[in-house]
Amino acid sequence: MRPAPALLFPPLAAAGTGLLAWLGISIVLLHARADLMPALHALQVAALLLGSALLAAALIGPRLLPDGRPAWPRWREGWAARADLAALAALGLALALFAVLRWVAPGPDRAMVLGLLGLGLAAAALVAISAAALAPDATGTPAEHPLRVPTQLLLALTLGLGLLFCLMAWLLPAGHGEPGMLLTLAVLGLLLAACLLLRWRDLDRGAPVPAGRRGERRVHAALLAAPLACWALALLLPATTWLVLATLALLAAAVLEHGGLRFATEYGRG
């Protein structure tokens, strides 16, 4: 039996790469705005450190488990290896970006370097998410449907955006859990639910659906609808707490998307 913590590593990788992708995109869009960059410095550094920590934990953690992956140099084949290579590239770019943000003085050259590093970070993170989606999941099931890659891309980016919104609510004076943040997560959650419904419909054609699978899907759909409920509640109560709860619901949905419940059902008996 594989240890239960193994179920968390794919969602942690999705959260870390999603957050780093948004960080890279934001730096590309704002690297030349000398008037805004100082105010965003703390947010960018916090997002960089959190995203890198989550991604590093997802890469190192499985190799520390008793039956985890072999050491990376021997693990060269398949989409999972490509995902690891892209994740390592993202971590290297994140380290370079941190050094530039921390120690290079503002100026035109710094802005150009930030733009290039941000573009590379976003690209590496998106490649890592896509390659991980094409790899077999925790149950050993390969990518069986064309919607699996866009679904996991959308889930990782939504989860990363939720983390970024939480950091904004914590670090920016004007970002204290705006309901608009929750509305954005709610819309993305509904898009995710629509993608999953289409995928499940295609996969279930001509085959009966086990009762346990139906229960898992109900939970999955409820978790993706949680940001919508949090947005509605935020119209009456402060939004910051609901923002954290919506992000946690998305993380739980990511565990299910990566086969966590089926994996636990199959191997938890051991």
Image (spheres, rainbow, N blue to C red):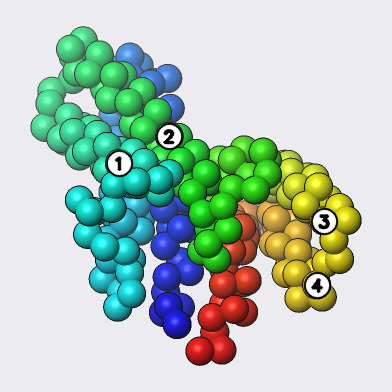
Q: Which residue is mark 4?
A: 210
Lower sequence index among marks 3 and 4 = 3
Q: CA distance from mark 3 to mark 4?
A: 10 Å
Q: Position of residue 51 (x, y in %)?
A: 36, 48
Q: Position of residue 111 (x, y in %)?
A: 25, 16
Name the mark on residue 204.
3
Marks 4 and 2: CB-CB under 8 Å? no
Lower sequence index among marks 4 and 2 = 2
Q: CA distance from mark 4 to mark 1?
A: 37 Å
Relative side of 212 to 167, left or right: right
Within 10 angstroms of label 2, few (less than 14), some, or many (20 or more) residues? many
Residue at x-position 29% and y-position 47%? 76
Q: CA distance from mark 2 to mark 3?
A: 29 Å
Residue at x-position 26% and y-position 71%? 64
Q: Which residue is mark 1?
A: 85
Classify mark 2: helix, strand or loop.
helix
Q: Amino acid at mark 3?
A: Asp
Q: Quadrant of residue 215?
A: bottom right
The answer to whether residue 141 shows anywhere in this view is: yes
Residue 21 vertical placement versus 79 (above, below): above
Q: Which residue is mark 2?
A: 127
Marks 4 and 1: CB-CB under 8 Å? no
Q: CA distance from mark 4 to mark 2?
A: 34 Å
Residue 177 vertical placement versus 123 (above, below): below
Marks 3 and 4: CB-CB under 8 Å? no
Q: Amino acid at mark 1?
A: Leu
| Closer to the eye: label 2 or 3 | 3
Residue 116 vertical placement versus 15 (above, below): above
Relative side of 2 to 118, left or right: right
Q: Position of residue 93 (x, y in %)?
A: 24, 34
